[in-house]
Image (cartoon, rainbow, N blue to C red):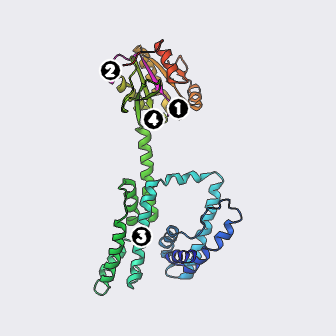
Amino acid sequence: MTVPINLASGTLAGVPVAGLYAGILPILVYALPGSSRQMIVTADAALATLVALSLAPLAGGDPARLVLLASATALLAGGVCLLGHLPRLGFAADLLSKPVMVGFNPGLAVVILLSQLPKLLGLPSPHGGSLEVPMALWQARGWAPLLDLGVGLGGIALILGFRRFAPRVGALLTLAGVVAYGMIEGIALGVLFSMLNILHSLAFPDDAVLGEHATGDYADLALSPPPRSVAGLLIYRFGAALIFVNSGRFRDRIEQRIEEAPGEVRGVIVDASQMLRIDLAAAEPLVEIGQDLANRGIRFALCCANPQVEAALKKLGLNATRLPLTIHANIAGARVMLLGDRASTN
């Protein structure tokens, strides 16, 4: 399968013979420094399409010039990857989340389909974006074999109809971007959406009020069957790192949870098991919470924090004088410190 696949990829890029070379030489080169026995080293339809869309207009219809441009681009891309390896920039690939790729792959399929339709019908390929292909087909409707086109498109639609497509917004956004604006712009749109989604999850993380099971474990009161709330105590879990984008929400949610408590709250315990870090911008709201609770006679404790969070609190100067907060290894220890004896449960 290597030969037809690489020839097809080369054809997509406009350099069919180079596609055949891409199935042989990279394997030999990777065998020297490579360490993975499962790595697939071959031509790629996505990159081939990207090369065609990016470089074909620069080649001006000259196949030899296109080969030179494609070769220079390959060497340049390889050099960028080697340079990116030095500062360990591979994490940038994490920005291409699954919703982005789910949208990119169907969008790429549509771009490839549109790029091949003129060849299927014997029409000249239009210059410009993928959306110009349907216009060119419409202009040639007087003689183009529309019946053959209908049969082909009907078969493709039937195949796609049997597949179950997940209607996720980031998938649809990337797909539309790839088809409407191009591959690079579509990917950028998907990455932007993913980054906005990440920011939203950081700014509005999940949180919970915990109660105690008969076994002594603590869990979300929203679970079914729910654990029992601890009388006089609010045990609050914040589901993200405490940073500048969510410190205000952290403060507001604690206040809201205190108001919603069924009885008087004499102590607040923050379960920091999911709070991976605390930054400088979050220090001031944390101080405001502690001082406000102290003024109201409510004791304040933090538990289950990792060493990085504890070190950050000390580094930020959040000592007992500035922040009336005690730190404990677990909820049970914080509970005994705040309420003295083990509190009763409701």
Q: Nearer the viewer, mark 4 or mark 2?
A: 2
Residue 323 is situated, as x and y percent measured from the top left of the image, at 50, 20
The residue that mark 2 highlights is: 262
Which badge, 1 or 3, is on the more N-terminal residue?
3
Q: Secondary structure at mark 1?
A: helix
Question: Please, which residue is most extreme toward the left here?
Answer: 142
Give the amino acid at mark 4: Gly
Of 208 and 311, nearer the camera is 208
Note whether residue 140 is visible.
Answer: no
Question: Please, which residue is most extreme toward the front here?
Answer: 215
**Tags 4 and 1 in contact by the CB under 8 Å rule?**
no
Give the amino acid at mark 2: Pro
The residue that mark 4 highlights is: 239
The residue that mark 3 highlights is: 111
Q: Secondary structure at mark 2?
A: loop
Give the amino acid at mark 1: Leu
Query: Circle 3: is it few (<14), some (14-19), or many (20+) Cα within 10 Å?
Result: many
The residue that mark 1 highlights is: 280
> Which region is colored magenta?
260-279
Which badge, 1 or 2, is on the more N-terminal residue?
2
Q: At x 47% / y 53%, what residue is drawn?
A: 97
Q: Nearer the viewer, mark 3 or mark 2?
A: 2
Which badge, 4 or 1, is on the more N-terminal residue?
4
Of 52 and 281, nearer the camera is 52
